[in-house]
Amino acid sequence: MGASRSSGTTDELGPDEDSGGGPPGCSADPGPPADDAGIPGEPPGSELLAALLDGMDAALCAFDAAGTVTHWNREAERVLGWTAREAVGRTGFAGWAVRRADADEVRARLMSAMDAPGRQVHEFALLRKDGGRVLVRTQSAGVRGADGQPAGVYCAFSEVHAQIDLERAIALSEALLEDASWGVVLVDVDLRPTVVNAYAARALGGGRTALLGRPLGELVVQGVEELEAALHHVLAEGAPSAPAELWVTLRTAEGERRRCWRSGFLRLASPLTEEPVPLGVGWLFRDVTAGKLAEQEADRLRFRTSQLHRAARTASECEDPMEAATSLLDFALAGFADHVLVDLVAGERLVRTAATPFDAPGPCLLVSGGAIPARYGPGHPALRSVERTGTVRTSAGAGDAAQAWAAERRWPRDAAHALCAVLRSRGRTLGVLTFLRAANRSAFERPDAAYAETVAARVAGAVDLAQVTAGT
């Protein structure tokens, strides 16, 4: 049996010797039925029944107990090309809708449903009016009269490829909403989740049913405005042409955590209406936080390496070693910190030797008029760095406490995060280097400490050279 993949393309196999007609003695047109739906006799309510049959998405035909076609709807006409006028009144499919060689088997299998319980499913190769063949899947069931006796059979059928496409679509949707390796969330027009798959539930930090119907703002602490704006855009304008990367902060039992989701969006519209009616948005996403952080770290490392290279070339052209030290710090500050302080050891105390301006961004300059003592109290991070001969990281709280925290440590008022790296050269501690960030930036982390120690080693070399030069 050959089966076409679309209703417009069929195998070049025509009907047998009586392709246009029915049984012997019947013409190709058995005469007009009582109405266009092929319901003879015009019983009461036939107009309503005709409308219902013609409005069905499935092709439908019916046979009486003798096997005569009694009903034939418009979808059956679309699939096979035979109109209701041509189909109703024929006995079986022999010679017009099926090859004569297959007619007896098809008739027997269809009519067997009249006495069998439930529905029967079969696949047949039927003939189109243009002579081609099309493979259909049928569901047939018996019809009983008022007396309870078998009165005929109805048969709903569709092209096999259409049925397979439907099954594939259903299987795909079930797989996406169950076992997909990316998150799938269906949201309604009010932007509330209606379906959440297992991946999305884990990413959002809740159960699949617990997340349904809740506003996205309850799940996402930061970034919800961008997410909702994307969903609104999809509802109004349609899906974007490329995936979007959204950074969000989630509220979880372990606290807040920041994630990056590569997201795609699809507008969902009802297929049952002439005008597209939005049902919501399909949101598909994948957590790419690890990859994005790795990319950011690689970019940061490349930039810092480039800055150190440029700083070394600039410092090599400076005649004054302390000028070389401040030049190094100017390059190091870019993208790394807002302020830098250089405190050198002078006996039992530290003295401020160079710094950036406290009240505005600017270059690192030597203290005019010479070094001045740094009035650091006991336990100050710079003093702890010297005592440990290592790096110290610290941060302030939020709000007014941050300003008091900075003032107490003799730092600029906007300082909220600090990193103190000791200056060491030839086995001696020469002082301490302090980098400061404002509250709108993140705290210093371990990779930042490694970078600061590299800068401190180069600055310490320049400071040591300056001290040796001054002593000769």
Image: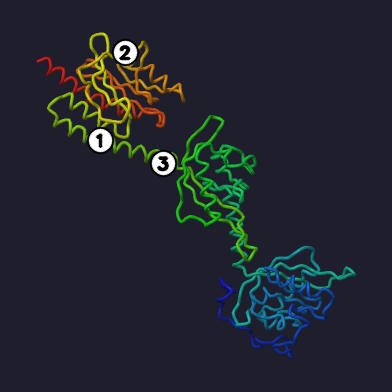
Report crowding for label 1: few under 14, some 14 to 19, many 20 or more residues within 10 A (C-alpha): some
* Residue 375 tag number: 2
What residue sits right under mark 1 in the picture? 307
State how far apart marks 1 and 3 are (Cα): 24 Å
Question: Which residue is outermost to the right?
Answer: 147
Question: Element under label 3?
Answer: helix
Q: Quick check: 162 above or below 285?
A: below
> Label 3 sits on what residue type?
Gly
Question: Element under label 1?
Answer: helix
Q: Quadrant of residue 32?
A: bottom right
State how far apart marks 3 and 2 are (Cα): 45 Å
Tell me if label 1 and label 3 are in contact, CB under 8 Å.
Answer: no
- The residue under the point 88% across, 68% down is 148
Q: Quadrant of residue 345?
A: top left
> Label 1 sits on what residue type?
Gln
Position in image of residue 41 (x %, y %): 83, 81
Position in image of residue 81 (x %, y %): 64, 79
If you read the primary sequence from the N terminus, does the residue marked by circle 2 or circle 1 appear first? 1
